[in-house]
Image (cartoon, rainbow, N blue to C red):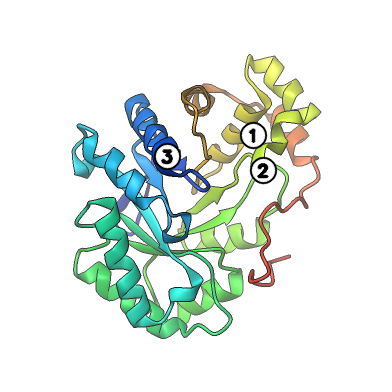
Amino acid sequence: MDNLQTQGISLPRLGLGTFRMQGDTCRAAVESALALGYRHIDTAEMYGNEEAIGAALSSAAIARNDLHITTKVWHDNLAPDAIQRAFDASLKKLRVDHVDLYLVHWPSRNMRLSAIFETLMRLKEEGRTRAIGVANFTTALLKTVVEEIKAPIACNQLEYHVMLDQGAVLKYLAAKSIPLVAYCPLAQGRVASDETLAKIGAKHGASAAQVALKWLLDQPGVAAIPKASRRESQKANLDALTINLDDEDRKAIAALPKDRRCVNPSFAPAWDR
């Protein structure tokens, strides 16, 4: 599997998202993914499944250096002391002595960015996280973090799929050599019923979802973390890597409406246009 090199870490371009997976179902899903060859597992404090993932990781006969683990701090915990407590709790639940990437899960309207990144950079300096980054940050917020605070951001995790344009933030990230990690890469299942994607898939002996995923992973600097609890879905996502989309396919995908945002909570920032 291809990896993206960013801020001293090697980020597998296809990972396993675990939002809304809980307990034994989550543990079984992570064990299944690891057995299939996944090495990038994405979780968060807010998901409430770090303990289940920790159990799966501890039972897997895989060297820690071969795994990439991302977790995130919730927007209610962005004061320095709260970040420290949340981080310590995440490490304990995951049963690891470090994570590979620690993200600010969502920006907060009252956050003090300088204090947040001073805390995150200290965790990085201590070797407890190998890299730091953000999720759901707009271009304006990224500019503050990257250009004013000069924090070594390893990625911005965003909703991104064939039905949502992220051109503005992608342009900024590319200029700064910062990867975009796409969550909801299958638009919460909506891509499966899209006629254009299904037609392209039929041409390649693939599903509409596989086409949508490969479209993302063909883009420079983009990784994706589709949620998949069933082994069949996990394998299908891996198999998407073998599809070769052509210019005609990409032109048809470019013509799809790009205004369907699936995740837009009340505390979300004002998104880039």
Residue 36 falls left or right of residue 22? left
Q: Nearer the viewer, residue 155 or 87?
A: 87
Q: Secondary structure at mark 2?
A: helix
Q: Is residue 232 above or below residue 169?
A: above
Mark 2: which amino acid? Ala
| First along the sequence among labels 2 and 3 | 3
State the residue position of label 2: 187
When the figure is inspected, residue 272 is found, relative to residue 49, above or below; the finding is below
User: Exactly how many numbered labels are in the figure?
Assistant: 3
Q: Residues within 10 Å of mark 3 (few under 14, many from 20)?
A: many
How far from the left and from the top, in percent, is residue 73?
42, 66
C-alpha gap between disc 2 and disc 1: 9 Å
Does the image show residue 120? no
Q: Position of residue 96 (x, y in %)?
A: 22, 52
Residue at (69, 66) in percent of width and height: 272
Which residue is under mark 3?
A: 26
